[in-house]
Image (tube, rainbow, N blue to C red):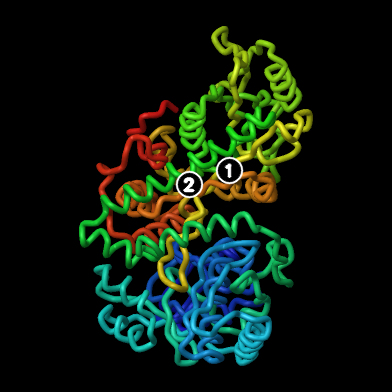
Amino acid sequence: MSSQLKIYCENISQYVDIAGGETLSEIYARLKDRVATEPICARVNNKTEDLSFQVFAPKVVEFLSGDSASGRRVYIRSLCMLLYRAVHECYRGARLIIEHSLSKGYYCRLEGVGPLTEEIVASIRDEMRRLVDRDIAFERKERLRKDVIEIFRRQGLDDKVRLFETIDDLYVVYYRLDGLCDSYYGPLAPSTGSLKVFDLIAYRDGMLLLGPSPSNPSVAQTPVVQDKMHRAFNEHLAFNHIIGVANVGELNETVAHRRTADLINVAEALHDKKIASIADEIARRYNEGGARVVLIAGPSSSGKTTTTKRLAIYLMTNLLRPKMISLDNYFVDRTKTPRDESGDYDYESLYALDLDLFNQNLNDLIAGKEVHLPTYNFETGTRMFKEKDKMRLEENSILLIEGIHGLNPGLTPSIDEKMKYRVYVSALTTLSIDDHNWVPTSDNRLLRRIIRDHKYRGTSAIETIRRWPSVQRGEQKWIFPFQENADSTFNSSLIFELGVMKDYGLEILGRVPHDCPEYSEAYRLLKFLSFFSPIGEKLIPPTSLLREFLGGSSFHY
């Protein structure tokens, strides 16, 4: 080959001669004996691209397998288009709606075919497998936005038409599979033959699309029971239907028609109503001789702190006296903190807490004794006791304990079960980008955390993004397995919040340098935010949970 250009291939730590215009797939074909992984996509100058990407200039390239973070997203997106193509073949005219992640998979509904039977789901699954066997290419296309809108209009994808009519991109990327078009906010796999591991099963009144297991990518995920999470999602989906905002296109139309104030007021009222309902149930159990300890748990940036403070207010209207304790103050000294597999301090571990002291304090408080509570100094990584931090429970007092481990039975083994009431808080985002692209709850929380860390902790987006995989591993191990232990689930997402966070996110993420690995995630989030019309924050009340991240809250943190 006559050498015209060089790329640097991270997989082999070498420069490679290429001809201008070669695709990543063609480059890999020449390097596959030296690259240890079979790629599903590649990172090019810290942007994730599909393997049809043509290289016309010097680049840094890293080929990524399906079990990398970016590769898993590519795999699942591609499975979604595979499912859409199979539904179109088996039940032409049916509407496929992929709503959210649930039970280790992705919950889907199918409108226009009547009740979803096992036989219907099996016929779609069999068609997906036939498409995999045919090894059909996912063809990347890019055309004028108005032309793509017409393509989707002809296919009956009104949700995508509405979305693209509310954004101002001149050109739009979409994909074609066996003559059928769809769009996703990220690259897809080279072909259907890359998607050999999946399952599709009937689940409740819909279907569950299951990708490869992270622990064993050669087999599909095994679903877990998440009935309470399913109900929490359905409650908000019903609310979305009532207010007429189920996807980003409809949200953007609401902004364009200046109906944002009404949307904010109704969404905040829904939060108030749910918290009041939880407070009423806690008060009922308290008056029946139980519920002396309320444990509020949830993953990072779910809004646990504001939820706890608002719950305290509603408990007071039920004539109870809430006393609040943060689990963060029970961290062991940093030198005794367990470490994760990377060697970093594992603050997500249950055993990063002094469980003996915590349970002793709880038992003493319930027995009516005065307790000297600890305070954890995050700067020095040590525990201290301040003279003012003493607590005794008075008549009608109830303890509110906020922290990520509240649902874990190992946190409070010495406390009688009837005395505990558990609340799970998470941003269970029910807003979809369109019928085939949901808003991941983890992305919603990551954006909250990026903004909060930048605003209150002086932490850059680079550091927050770098730390996020470790946070997620901790959540998978210490939080999510215990979700179904909750007595109540509070969905802390607000349907308008991504529009409000857009300008904050663009400004902070825009500072991430292109030459650092974290730019790949920053770029993905920037692309994600580009779908949203900005919403000003002046209408957000000071009691809003969103104020915990934006600032301007009437609560003290």
Q: Which residue is mark 1?
A: 298
| Residue at 54% across, 22% down | 321
| Residue at 60% across, 55% down | 229
Amino acid type, mark 1: Gly
| Residue at 75% across, 29% down | 415
Q: Secondary structure at mark 1?
A: loop
- Quadrant hosting residue 391: top right
Q: Secondary structure at mark 2?
A: loop
Residue projecting furthest to the top:
387
Is residue 372 depicted above or below 400 in this figure? above
Classify mark 1: residues with Cα within 10 Å, few (<14), some (14-19) or many (20+). many
Q: Nearer the viewer, residue 43 or 111?
A: 111
Instruction: Mark 2 and mark 1 in contact? Answer it, CB < 8 Å.
Output: yes
Quarter placement of the C terminus: top left
Say left or right for 208 vs 518: right
Quick check: can you spot residue 198?
Answer: no
Q: Which mark is residue 218?
A: none
Q: Residue 449: x and y, percent?
A: 46, 43
Q: Residue 444: x and y, percent?
A: 46, 52
Amino acid type, mark 2: Ser
Quick check: can you spot residue 429?
Answer: yes
Is residue 342 depicted above or below 254 in this figure? above
Label whose residue precedes the other's in the sequence (2 or 1): 1
Q: Which residue is mark 2?
A: 492
Q: Nearer the viewer, residue 25 or 387?
A: 387
